Amino acid sequence: MEAGDALIMARVQFGLNIAFHILFPTITIGLAWILVYFRAQYARTGEAAWLATYKLWLKVFALTFAMGVVTGIVMSFQFGTNWPGYMNHVGNVAGPLLAFEVLTAFFLEATFLGVMLFGMNRVPGWMHLTSTVLVAVGTSLSAFWILALNSWMQTPAGYAYAIDGQIIAGDWWQVIFNPSFPYRFTHMMLASGLTAAFVVTGLSAWRLLKSAEDAAAFKTLRTGIVLAAFLAPLQILVGDMHGLNTLEHQPAKIAAIEAIWKTERGAPLVLFAIPNEAQKRNDFSIEIPKMASLLLKHDADAELKGLDAFAPDTAPVAPVFYSFRIMVGMGVLMLALSWFGAWKTKNRVLPSKWLLWAFAASTFSGWIATLAGWMVTEIGRQPWLVTGLLRTADAVGPVGEAKLGASLTGYVVTYGLMLVAYMVVMTHLAGKGDGHALLRQDTTQKVRG
Amino acid sequence: MTLDLPVIFAFLMGAAVLAYVVLDGYDLGVGMLMPAADEHEQSIMVASIGPFWDANETWLVLGVGLLLVAFPVAHGVILVALYLPVVAMLIGLMLRGVAFEFRIKAEGWHRELWNWLFWFGSFIASLAQGMMLGSYITGFGSGFGYFMFSLLVAGGLCGGYVLLGATWLILRTEGALQKKALDWTRWGLMWVALGVALVSVATPLASETVRDKWFDFPRTLELMLLPLASAAAWLWVWRLTGKLKKGEPAPEWGPFAGTVAIYVLAFLGLAYSLFPYVVMDRITIWEAAAHPSSLKVVLVGALIVLPFIIGYTVFSYRVFRGKTRDKLYE
């Protein structure tokens, strides 16, 4: 019993950290490329408005990036403090992937962010643009390596056993490009692009609500809307492909997502239900007959494996089932909002107040969708840490509940403080409408320079 | 000839940790010196480390990453044993890391709060690192005596970081702030001298292994080169700051370089005390090493990428060379 509680607490602590951490890279990976666009536009046109736009969003980026960096450092330590068994078992595969992330991505983005932030007057324009590109490359490379590792844990491939029984990499190419990696990586990159697009749109809408004449804010509003309108349908398509890939390689996760308790032919699509874990059935369910088989197998009478086929190695159904529906729901809302917005702003006219309010309210909608998606994929693979190779329970460390409780409290307080401060500064940056001030300042600088 | 991969990785990991201690050491030190400066000076102090702190902390991630890659067994043992100081350090690093961003954008008491958290985070992180080092040297011994020993090491390390921070400020600032930095350097030097003396006496008492290694005549005589060289570096820094205080010509990079030399020498001494253990008296680097196949792939990758990292780090220090005058975000 006691070991079980420590396991739960270790998972809560790690889950809290990783969930808090992912909020920030999700914005910065996409925003880094949006900044490249702003910076390139300034380089191309030399217009002060683009420079002001770049500088404002650079502040948002720097703030968000710092939040990601510091919470990421925590993660690198929690692998060892919370899951010592993880490295003992699969360290020969996981270690090098993490090392490559540090070597190829972290130093690159950290160093050139310094140049980006403080070097504008110290390096030539082309070097500053290059630094902006390198930071974007760094953030994407970081996503590449960490998703390679995460995907390998979901769908391990390319590994071998050494003479002494250790798990080692047999073929690095197969380890990195494991079956779920291309889908998961694309899905995450699109999620990041969408999240960043909604942050840009949302904060720009907020600024327009404060001052309708803010031309720079209208420009960025339109940039964000168009980007979101373009990425949202792509994301739905890729998400569907990712789901089919999961059905092939992690069918137990699909059974939990769709709350299919028993293997059956012509399985119905459960739109909504309250999964009943104790009785292994759905209460109050609303279903479309045969639809799950049709969607997943493209054949209305095909057999879908239920949770009973994988027992006892199944995930808790309710959190996976609900999270999936939240993710899909958010995706559809984001698609609808971005298309409607694109239509309403197509003649470069300021949309109505209520639409601006809708965009401002959905600034962080990408966070909800991303977190829900991560709950689906991470809870959905339980009880495995590395599918088929290592159980989560076998990786947990001997740290006692008292220590875990004390440190969890410390983390919760720190994260709470950081999140409140982050939100305050973000609304401050957006609401101050300092685009005008920046604009004036930069024009004068230009005249002088 | 076969490569002794665990030895190579012990060297790489040591180099990463040394780079971390020196690089993040100066910016943690600047953070700890915040309360001694006025508001305008604080802005310049933060600006002097603004472009660098993030990359500096990345060396810590590389250090713990190499521990994880190269010595996975030890990685778990060490981090579980150091659980609480690691958590304290992480919370400290988080608070100070985001304080860079928040303090600049805040006004009034919010700014005061983030200035305070910047100092507090720097101090907690430094203290926790010292506690970790103290506990690590003794093989995670538990009990009041070991705790006091760790506290002693932590005090010494905080002094060392303050010294690094102060000498960094001599190099990067001018005028009244530089004068203050010269005074801080003197205090830091005395603090470090006391800390090193106490730790040198206490370590052989706390660890039999260390005692046997250092009191092994005639090798002891050769080993005395390390403390002698450290003392020389210490005296050089003292003399240079004396000259600079009087306004006599002396290289402003000298105090920082001398302090780095003290760190390198202390680190060599530490490495000698520990080798070949990765967990003192319990696990050697060969016992803890990962499979050669995974070590080889990381080594090849590191040899390709590290020159680039060093190259653009040098580039960044060149871009931001000279005295810090402007505030952040001009």
Image (cartoon, coloured by chain):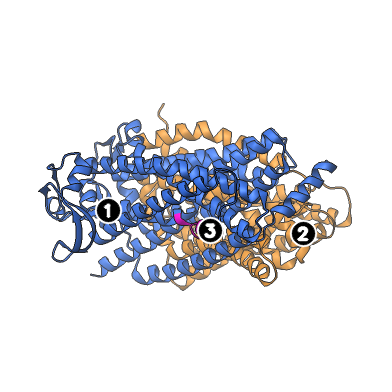
Chain colours: A blue, B orange
Q: Amino acid at mark 1?
A: Gly
Q: What residue span does the magenta drawing correspond to?
A: A354-365
Q: Which residue is mark 1?
A: A380
Please state which of the two labelled residues, at mark 2 or mark 3, is closer to the viewer: 3
- Secondary element at image label 1: helix
Q: Residue placed at 65% from the left, 51% from the top?
A: A56
Disc 2: CA contacts within 10 A as few (<14), some (14-19) or many (>=20): many
Judging from the image, mark 1 belongs to the subunit labelled: A
Please state which of the two labelled residues, at mark 2 or mark 1, is closer to the viewer: 1
Judge left or right: residue A341 versus residue B170.
left
Q: Where is residue A20 drawn, in percent x and y?
A: 45, 59
Asked if the residues shown at circle 3 and circle 1 are in contact, with their CB atoms under 8 angstroms apart, the answer is no
* Label 3 to label 1: alpha-carbon separation: 32 Å
Q: Quadrant of the N terminus of chain B?
A: top left
Q: Amino acid at mark 3?
A: Ala
Judging from the image, mark 3 belongs to the subunit labelled: A
Q: Main secondary structure of the magenta part?
A: helix
Examine the rendered structure and indicate whether residue B63 appears above or below residue A67. Answer: above
* Label 2 to label 3: alpha-carbon separation: 47 Å
Check residue A63 for magenta coloring.
no
